Every structure is written in structure tokens, then in C-alpha cells.
Image (cartoon, rainbow, N blue to C red):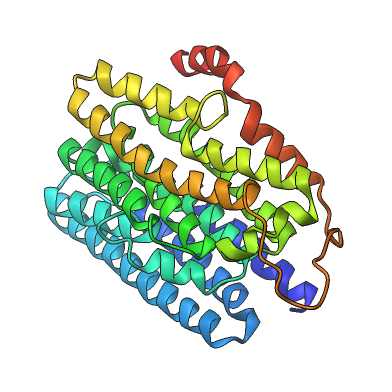
Amino acid sequence: MNPYVLTILLSSLGLGTVLTFASSHWLLAWMGLEINTLAIIPIMAQQHHPRAIEATTKYFLTQATAAAMILFASTTNAWLMGEWEIHQLSHPLATTTVMLALALKLGLAPVHFWLPEVLQGLELTTGLILSTWQKLAPFALMIQTAPTINSSLLVAIGLLSTLVGGWGGLNQTQLRKILAYSSIAHLGWMVLILQFAPSLTLLSLSLYIIMTSSAFLTLKTNNALTINTLATSWTKSPTLAALAALVLLSLGGLPPLSGFMPKWLILQELTKQGLPLSATLAAMTALLSLYFYLRLCYALTLTIYPNTLTATAPWRLNFTMITLPLSIITILALGLLPLTPAVTAMLAL
């Protein structure tokens, strides 16, 4: 793609997100979401491959449906209650419709079916943008409207997402689909705590973005798309393979890695709020996710790919990309747990 065109598209992507962040009026927020969607579609379709075109079409249809639902809900609220402000969303029909529309935009269960299929058709860099940056604008709207949404609906969607995210990734061999189900599970944890402690949702989102970026960039460096090709990583770069295994365990939420921090604090907050059953169910669904992360770690570090070809196996990576961002993000994805007391003190302010 032409660098000037790419610059314009990425700038529009940023503009749409910032516009949604800054808006207090539903129409302005809707415009930001639309700019965001229209900016990423040419980036997704730049491969000119049937799978990429199919993924782009699916993404466009789901995002257009969600945007139409948001417009319908905000217009309904303005018609019935006389308010266009995001904070003044008060009619039950409007709040439920907006929640489902934002769940569709984010890929939360039970409207998650598009996310694994779309992510599977994209290259890893575009998939990274879709899994991280594209979650920010809908989450900003969800945090603003959370006080007016039925808490039982939020907890139900959160628990269902953690369950679907763990269950759906068990039988997958494609790494992009596994990361898509991982995304669904992590978003479920964020929605679960959204109404009780929005600051914890932001902390979880920040750490999710760091860990997912590290995972995607590692896979891109190794040029791995399936579990079988992941098995060649140790031959190419043992250090990177070992760090990638730790990043996956951090995504699973194992101590003493960074990913344990949000799960620990969320379970603690749910218990404080008198929801021990929800906390127990969320912890049990995290074990499902942990299983397929351990499966990836096993393929990454404990198996050697059966090389039946006459050619020799590649033993060194051809570094044509800048690895400094990967190094920084990997350090953050692994070593932030000791900062938990400082983070909890900041959240208490």
C-alpha cells in the first residue's frame, strides 16, 4: 500500500477513536465509530486475497449493524426522554440496545461469532490493530453508559464471554483464532467488573493490550500462523521462543507474571461486592483458557518440528523488522506484577 494512503488511513483511525473519546453527544460518538470502521476496512482488504476480502466484508456488515443499533437506541432515547447526552441514557430499551450493540462491536458473547472468522482472514499486524486499538472507542462508550445498564446483564455477558472464550479456543489449531477467543475471554473479565470498579476495567484493558501486542509481534517475528509452525520457533530463536511461552502464560493469568494482576484484583473486588459465585465461575473459566495457553507453550518449547524435507531447517531468523517495540512490550507483559501495591494505591485515589 502507498505510504501516503496508509498514513491517511491510520490518521483517520486515530481521529475516529479520539472523536469518540471526546464526545458527550451520541451523534458525535457515532460519527467517530463510523470514521474508525471506514478507515480500517482498506487496511484489512489490502492483501487482495479471498480470505481477506471475506473477513473485511464480515467485519463491515457486523460493524454497520452495531452502528445502526447505536443510532436507533440514541434516537429512541432522545424521542422518549428528550436527551442526546451519552451520560443521560436512561430508557431501559435504549440502554439494553446500546449494550448489545457495543457487545457486537467488541465481539463479546453471545454476539462473538464474527471475531474468530474475521481475525483468521487477516495478517498479524492488521489483526493486532483489530484486537487492541479497535476495542478502545466502544469501551469508552461502554464505561460512560455502564451506570445506567442493568448489572445482571453485564455480569451475565461477562461470565458468558469468559466461558465462550475458554471453551472456543480448546479445539483450535490456528493461532489467530486462538488469540481471538483469548480476546473474547479477556473482554469478558473487563465487562464483569465494569459497573463495580471501572478503574479495574481500564487496568485490565491496558494490560490486555500490552500482552496481546507482545503475543502478536512474537508470532509475526517467528512467522507462525498454526501450532505446527510454532514448533519451528525453538530452532530459529530459543530466547524468543522461551519469552513467547512466558507471554502466553501471562495471558493465561499465571503468577508471578503481569497477567495475574487484573484477574487477582477483579476476583477480590467481586468477592467484596458480594458476588462469590460469579468470582468462582470466572476463576473456573480461566482454567479453560489456561489449558490452551499451556498447549501452545508445549508446542513452542517442548516439541521439535518433524523435518521430513530434504532441505535443512532454518536455524536463524532473518531480522528485517525492528524488534525494539517487541522487547519493551514483552518486558511489560512479564514484569509488572511487583507494581500491584502501587497500582492499587493509585486506583484507590
Image coordinates of residue 302 in percent, x first then y, are: 62, 47
The number of discs equals: 0
Image coordinates of residue 310 in percent, x first then y, are: 79, 78
- The answer to whether one can see residue 104 in this image is yes
Of residues 307 and 274, the one drawn nearer to the viewer in this rendering: 307
Q: Residue at x 78, y 73 (%)?
A: 4
In this rendering, would 230 be left or right of 282?
A: right
The quadrant of the picture occupied by the N terminus is bottom right
Of residues 69 and 57, the one drawn nearer to the viewer in this rendering: 57
Of residues 247 and 343, the one drawn nearer to the viewer in this rendering: 247
Of residues 146 and 105, the one drawn nearer to the viewer in this rendering: 105
Q: Residue at x 53, y 61 (%)?
A: 175
Image coordinates of residue 241 in percent, x first then y, are: 70, 47
Q: Residue at x 15, y 49 (%)?
A: 81
In this rendering, would 342 be left or right of 71?
A: right
Image coordinates of residue 315 in percent, x first then y, are: 84, 59
Vertical comparison of 321 with 308: above or below:
above
Q: Quadrant of residue 314?
A: bottom right
- The answer to whether one can see residue 144 in this image is no
Q: Residue at x 28, y 55 (%)?
A: 109
In this rendering, would 322 be left or right of 304?
A: right
